[in-house]
Image (spheres, rainbow, N blue to C red):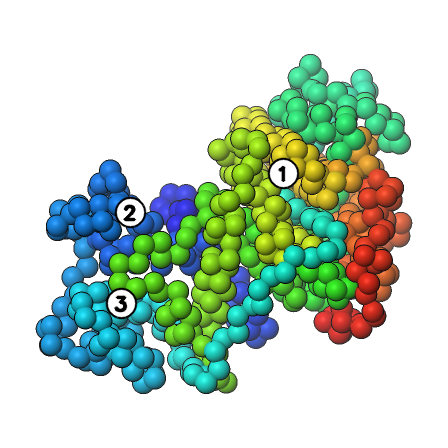
Amino acid sequence: QAAIGQAPYVIPNVFSFFLPEYQAPGQIQRTGLKSPEAQVMNAPTIVGFLNGLLSMLDVGLSDCYSGFGGRTVWNCAGFEKGWFSDFDDYNHGSIKYEPTGGSTATGAAVVDELVTLLLGGRVDDTVRATIAAEYDNFTDKGKAKLYAQKMMLGLPEFHSSNVVLRDHATARAEAPAPVASANPYKAIIFLNLHGGMDGFNMLVPNCPDQFKDYQDARGEIALLNRDLLTIQTTGQADCNTYGLHPKLTGLRDLYNEKSLSFIANLGILQEPVTKSDWRKKSGATALFAHNTQTEETAAVDIFDEYAGVGVGGRILDAMFAKNFKPGAVSVSGSAPPVVAKSSPLLVVDPSGYEEFDPVPFSTRMTDHFKNANPSTTVGSGLFSETYSKSLFQSLSENALLFAKYNAVKLTNTFPATHVGRAMGSIAKLIQTKDDRGVDRDVFFAQKEGFDTHFDIEVPLQNLFQELDDGLSKFAKELKDKGLWDDVTVICVSEFGRTLMGNTGNGSDHAWGGNYFVMGGGVDGGKILGEYPTDLSNNSPLVFSPGIVLPTTPWESVWSAVSEWFGVTDPAEIAKILPNKDKFTGLWDAADIFKPGSFGAEEAASKNTEQNIFAEMYA
């Protein structure tokens, strides 16, 4: 699972490892094709997969050098240092290939044979000749065989059945070497709680009458009053005392120190709705469906005006047009919310940053793999091109970041949980901003498991405990490093859950929910939005079985966050949020953030108007 993103019995959700409708960003998406498996194709899984196969060729099946096997030796150095005379005594099996011509076989004959066996003959003569010439240069024919077999793994023909038409005169362009920016740094973390987070057991009204209303609405799944963590607010219609789930002690502390605000009754909206017209006014989306609503929260573009680009990606593109240096980063694989036109997606595995080809037993393969994946010509397969582009980017990222990322030392010990590792990884990546040459990052992190249809009590306790522990450590780490004021975390989920519990003591798919935003620049200690004053099915905002109509659209949150990030032009906000005009009173930065935490970016960038952003989204 850690190496290639897939393993038996650990599917992340009901849709398995990838969605049938997934489209890889770029040419696949622009042509309307589908590429489900590409959803798990990113730098960590590409490197993990290739390393596993390279290890198999080098030392046989074991766990050494990122191999796919079990432990066979206590010290893998024995392989590279010559301690083992016969590797097969120290592995669970190995690949044996002997050319038909034996030790006298020429490089051309060996390559032709491997291409026929492994790739159906689908490799052009120039690539064959290059590999054959390198084969013939080896004096050690054992290493030559290893090299030739490894080269098959680096060819797009090995990973796709497409025809590949290479332009051998045009190397694939490398990204320029990063240069540290003089602009002030800011980062947004899009934290997706996938499955539909039960926000009405995260934030509970705790005035006597309102708590009784909550208990009646939630039935058996209601929290007990005595267990709630009390917080105070102002401005809500009929109750200013609220309670948090008892596992959210860290979030309570951040709220009380005014670094966190909750947002009540937030959700995806096509336009404002009522109980009588919500169906008619929601025809552009499929409410209550995980995949559709996850796409909607990622894009905040309900009419698909800029399909394929995430809301975080459009914010990055706007900053790119202002001469800032944006970075789109994921610690959770594919990341639709941060897909941008100006910035390739950097993917990092929070379980550990794995070096590509760590111990080359024949020759280091990085440059050989890159040279075998040059630019392609018109008519070349789009799926093979998608792989080549991803491989090339992955190898470049790996060379740049392996040492830099691992050199960052955290001052706090993060929990060994999914959220803990993800937030620890983001904390390290923020500290590599100069090495990456960025001054604006949008990060994506995701925690699965919030689809709590059954026996909600214990799973939600565990989920909230993990969330609270990871975010608390993250806040402390950034405070210790003086970076807390530069970061905003936005809690997102595709929808809320029904107020009334179901027959399995869980809650089902619904609509409006409660979320939070946190960071050093947040003017916290508030509950923004409108918490429903009546949670019964008789409420103007609730219909059976306890589905709450949202009163605040996601556009409000992203409008304020965009301004905090540095996007101040109303025309640019309209591109970031193409459906914003359907709503009135959307928030600006001052509604969520502290004075002085936003507004200086235009001067810092020394931008001359070039209308680049408008051209991107014409």
- What secondary structure is marked by label 1? loop
Q: Amino acid at mark 2?
A: Cys
Binning the other alpha carbons within 10 Å of mark 1 as few (below 14), some (14 to 19) or many (20 upward) gives many
Q: Is residue 337 left or right of residue 374?
A: right
Residue 77 appearing in the image: yes
Q: Is residue 117 left or right of residue 213?
A: left
The answer to whether residue 389 is above or below residue 484 is: below
Q: Amino acid at mark 1?
A: Met
Looking at the rendering, which quadrant does residue 202 occupy? Answer: top right
> Which residue position is annotated with label 2?
64
Q: Nearer the viewer, mark 1 or mark 2?
A: 2
Residue 25 placed where, x, y %? 57, 66
Q: Considering only order in the chain, which callout, 2 or 3, is on the residue closer to the N terminus?
A: 2
The answer to whether residue 185 is above or below residue 610 is: above
- Name the residue rendered at 12%, 50% in the picture: 85
Q: Quadrant of the C terminus?
A: bottom right
Residue 248 placed where, x, y %? 65, 26
Residue 175 placed where, x, y %? 56, 68
- Name the residue rendered at 76%, 71% in the picture: 612
Front position in the image: 31 or 70: 70
Query: Marks 3/2: CA distance?
Result: 19 Å
- Name the residue rendered at 72%, 71% in the picture: 616
Q: Amino acid at mark 3?
A: Tyr
Query: Marks 3/1: CA distance?
Result: 50 Å
> Which residue position is annotated with label 3?
147
Query: Marks 1/2: CA distance?
Result: 40 Å
Picture disc at residue 197: 1
Looking at the rendering, which quadrant does residue 476 occupy? Answer: top right
- Name the residue rendered at 33%, 66% in the picture: 153
Q: Considering only order in the chain, which callout, 2 or 1, is on the residue closer to the N terminus?
A: 2
